[in-house]
Amino acid sequence: MPRRLVYLALIALAILHQDFFFADDATIVLGFLPIGLAYHALYCVATAVVWLLAIRYAWPHELVAFARGDDPPRREE
């Protein structure tokens, strides 16, 4: 289940990356930061969190076993 949530979060980030809604907005946030730049700063933080979750929950364990030189766990078919 967490793997699916990570995949959904990645899709959501891909959609949110298209920030056309702040393209013509000149609003200043915190007294000095344009809203488009503030959005991208928060987007970068959100992206880092999602990648952290991806590494934690969606990383293929077979790669780790291969890198360590261990025998990968066999899947029953």
Image (cartoon, rainbow, N blue to C red):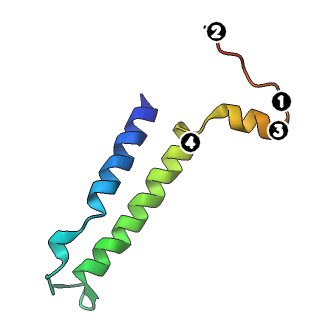
Amino acid type at mark 1: Asp
Residue projecting furthest to the front: 77
- Label 3 – label 1 distance at C-alpha: 5 Å
Read off the residue under disc 4.
Answer: 56
- Label 3 – label 2 distance at C-alpha: 22 Å
Q: Is residue 72 depicted above or below 60 in this figure?
A: above
Instruction: Please identify, in this view, whether the residue under mark 4 or under mark 1 is nearer the observer.
Output: 1
Q: Residue at x 47, y 59 (%)?
A: 48
- Label 4 – label 3 distance at C-alpha: 18 Å
Amino acid type at mark 3: Arg
Q: Earlier in the sequence, mark 2 or mark 4?
A: 4
Question: What is the secondary structure assignment of the residue under circle 2?
Answer: loop
x and y percentages locating residue 65 in the rendered image: 76, 33
Question: What is the secondary structure assignment of the residue under circle 4?
Answer: helix
Crowding near the residue tagged with mark 1, few <14, some 14–19, many ≥20 C-alpha atoms within 10 Å: few
Question: What is the secondary structure assignment of the residue under circle 3?
Answer: helix
Q: Residue at x 15, y 87 (%)?
A: 26
- Please tell me the numbered disc located at residue 11: none
Q: Earlier in the sequence, mark 3 or mark 2?
A: 3
Q: Is residue 12 depicted above or below 45 in this figure?
A: above
Q: Earlier in the sequence, mark 1 or mark 2?
A: 1
User: In which image quadrant can residue 70 be found?
Assistant: top right
Read off the residue under disc 2.
Answer: 76
Read off the residue under disc 3.
Answer: 68
Q: Residue at x 72, y 38 (%)?
A: 64
- Please tell me the numbered disc located at residue 70: 1
Amino acid type at mark 2: Glu
Amino acid type at mark 4: Arg
x and y percentages locating residue 28 in the rendered image: 20, 87
* Left or right placement of residue 41 versus residue 32 in this view: right
Q: Earlier in the sequence, mark 4 or mark 3?
A: 4
Give yes or no for contact between labels 4 and 3 (Cβ–Cβ under 8 Å): no
